[in-house]
């Protein structure tokens, strides 16, 4: 099933149901479709056709949603990027994807205008007078009916850019089949039902944002967006729109729950919550249970390349657990070998840490990076996708993620996962958050360096050291040998700890 058809089915099933809400405007499926058709026909007149990339640098707003569906009807490739990318990365992504059209708004204008193009695209500006034409003009020039192009499931529907820790972002092309399968899996794995509603918190340049939009459409639900979303606005909308499900990164749950106005809002309609993208601490998991009282709470572990790896819906019993493979997935844990030497047959014995690999033949799995055969060869080997994540299975065969293969510490000959130590430190009552890295050491090979965000500034190094010495999960080699107190842990927009920045902080502290 291609995504244009997914949308058309939803429109014909319940044309008068509200599909999208932004500020005081409500759009039914039929109204949204009329604008989508105008955008599609107008883009077609500009020469956009199947397989053409349309790059979108917009906040989560109605225009981004209409462009998404219009591009699907055209069989073109929705290529959103983050407005927070550096000008250098923005230029790279534009030239890498060679879009026919670039759509931007005032907040993304600077990076678009600073870019040098190998082939100049057509520019569409959100605001009047911007670009070669404005979004409003685009809509005006179109027709309210549009015959969707015939698009095969294997064709590319969208391309998301993933930012690794090194090098330029990599384009991840995702076929209609990939996106449809991932969406159906998401609906099942989160027990979503017809007419579910959600808040478009995660941006459409992130796989989680796309998933929410698609899942809600399949279910003829309501997608609520606010281009400038802060925790207070999010709480207001969750309450006033009686939103039923939420899917976002752990950091955003923290921001919602810690907002001073939290207790003023009635969030009783919110029944299903899920997180992905980064680990959630035990403390935050418990707070989510206590304050949001979800009927269903899921940890979704996955990536842009393959949407679901595993999910866990028993977080009350097993906080932090990543659970079992998704409905389409086969998973193995193999000998961790950063040089890429291990094969899918090198499975680790039960109860040992291994690199998590997922079968790349799954309907949810991409086929390879855009213009990057080298990266594809590294990631997909013998038909298995190497996640670069380390995991361990408990006695029930449930997965726990213990870190990244390139972040594993080796101290005193012992393989140590940073996540294990961070969990222990974060359980100290005077610690709000903790992150650790390894630092070279003549005696131990590496020592553990801990970065602590205190919740109580009276906390001392001695106190933390005593706490670790007594903790059942800590061994001598795991115990941090150096502590640095910081105001915050550097994180990527998706909430992943940026350990190279921590390394820089530690070096500057030593100097
Ligand atoms: P991305 O493609 O940017 O979503 O990044 C995928 C990576 O994020 C995975 O390989 C993991 O390292 C991490 N990740 C995603 N979901 C989770 C999760 N639920 N818990 C811990 N790490 C996660």
Image (cartoon, rainbow, N blue to C red):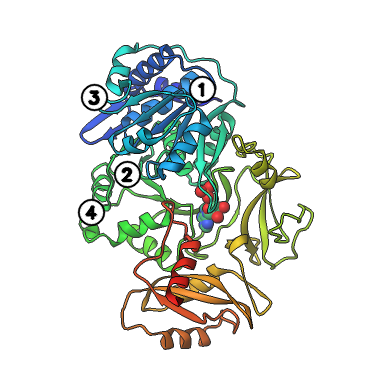
Of the 4 image quadrants, the one containing the N terminus is: top right
Label 1 to label 4: alpha-carbon separation:
44 Å
Looking at the image, is 449 positioned above or below residue 37? Answer: below
Residue at image x 33%, y 23%?
32
Q: As rendered, which of 286 and 445 lies closer to the eye?
A: 445
User: Disc number at residue 243?
Assistant: 2
Secondary element at tag 2: loop
Q: Residues within 10 Å of mark 1 (few under 14, many from 20)?
A: many
Of labels 3 and 4, the one closer to you = 3
Residue located beneath label 4 in the image: 265
Mark 3 and 4 residues: CB-CB less than 8 Å, in contact? Answer: no
Of labels 3 and 2, the one closer to you = 3
Upstream in the sequence, badge 3 or badge 1?
Answer: 1
Task: Tell me which corner region of the image, top left, top right, bottom left or bottom right, holds residue 241.
Answer: top left
Q: As rendered, which of 69 and 328 lies closer to the eye?
A: 69
The answer to whether 510 appears left or right of 410 in the picture is: left
Residue located beneath label 3 in the image: 128
Upstream in the sequence, badge 2 or badge 1?
Answer: 1
Image spot of residue 97 (x, y percent): 52, 31
User: Disc number at residue 52?
Assistant: 1
Image spot of residue 434 (x, y percent): 44, 71
Task: Tell me which corner region of the image, top left, top right, bottom left or bottom right, holds residue 34.
Answer: top left
Label 3 to label 2: alpha-carbon separation:
33 Å
Residue at image x 23%, y 60%?
263
């Amino acid at each position: 099933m291609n995504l244009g058809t997914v949308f058309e089915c939803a429109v014909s099933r319940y044309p008068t149901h509200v599909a999208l809400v932004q500020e005081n405007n409500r759009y039914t499926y039929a109204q949204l479709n009329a604008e989508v058709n105008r955008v599609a026909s107008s883009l077609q007149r500009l020469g956009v056709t199947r397989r053409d990339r349309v790059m979108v640098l917009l906040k989560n707003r109605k225009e981004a949603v209409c462009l998404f569906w219009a591009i699907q009807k055209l069989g073109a490739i929705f290529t959103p990027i983050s407005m927070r990318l550096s000008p250098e990365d923005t230029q790279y992504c534009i030239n890498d994807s060679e879009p026919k059209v670039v759509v931007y708004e005032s907040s993304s204008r600077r990076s678009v205008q600073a870019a040098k193009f190998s082939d100049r695209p057509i520019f569409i500006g959100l605001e009047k007078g911007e670009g070669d034409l404005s979004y409003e003009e685009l809509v005006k020039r179109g027709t309210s009916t549009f015959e969707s192009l015939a698009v095969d499931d294997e064709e590319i529907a969208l391309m998301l850019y993933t930012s690794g820790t090194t090098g330029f972002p990599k384009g991840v092309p995702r076929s209609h089949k990939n996106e449809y399968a991932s969406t159906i899996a998401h609906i099942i794995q989160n027990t979503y039902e017809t007419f579910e509603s959600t808040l478009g918190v995660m941006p459409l340049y992130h796989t989680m944002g796309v998933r929410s939009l698609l899942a809600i459409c399949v279910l003829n639900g309501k997608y609520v967006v606010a281009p400038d979303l802060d925790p207070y606005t999010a709480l207001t909308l969750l309450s006033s729109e009686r939103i039923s499900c939420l899917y976002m990164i752990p950091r955003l749950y923290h921001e919602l729950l810690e907002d001073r106005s939290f207790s003023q809002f009635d969030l009783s309609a919110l029944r299903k919550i899920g997180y992905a993208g980064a680990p959630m601490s035990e403390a935050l998991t418990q707070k989510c249970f206590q304050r949001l009282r979800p009927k269903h709470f899921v940890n979704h572990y996955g990536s842009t390349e393959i949407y679901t790896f595993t999910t866990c819906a028993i977080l009350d019993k097993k906080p932090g657990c990543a659970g079992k493979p998704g409905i389409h997935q086969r998973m193995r844990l193999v000998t961790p070998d950063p040089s890429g030497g291990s094969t899918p047959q090198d499975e680790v014995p039960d109860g040992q840490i291994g690199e998590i690999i997922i079968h790349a033949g799954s309907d949810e799995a991409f086929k390879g990076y855009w213009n990057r055969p080298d990266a594809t060869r590294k990631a997909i080997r013998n038909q298995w996708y190497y996640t670069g994540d380390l995991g361990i299975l408990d006695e029930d065969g449930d997965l726990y993620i213990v870190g990244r293969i390139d972040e594993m510490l080796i101290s005193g000959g012992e393989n140590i996962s940073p996540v294990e130590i961070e969990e222990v430190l974060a359980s100290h009552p005077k610690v709000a958050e903790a992150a650790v890295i390894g630092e070279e050491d003549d005696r131990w090979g590496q020592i553990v360096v801990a970065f602590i965000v205190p919740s109580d500034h009276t906390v001392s190094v001695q106190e933390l050291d005593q706490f670790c010495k007594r903790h059942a999960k800590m061994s001598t080699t795991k115990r941090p040998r150096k502590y640095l107190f910081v105001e915050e842990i550097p994180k990527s927009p998706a909430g992943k700890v940026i350990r190279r920045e921590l390394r820089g902080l530690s070096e500057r502290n030593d100097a």
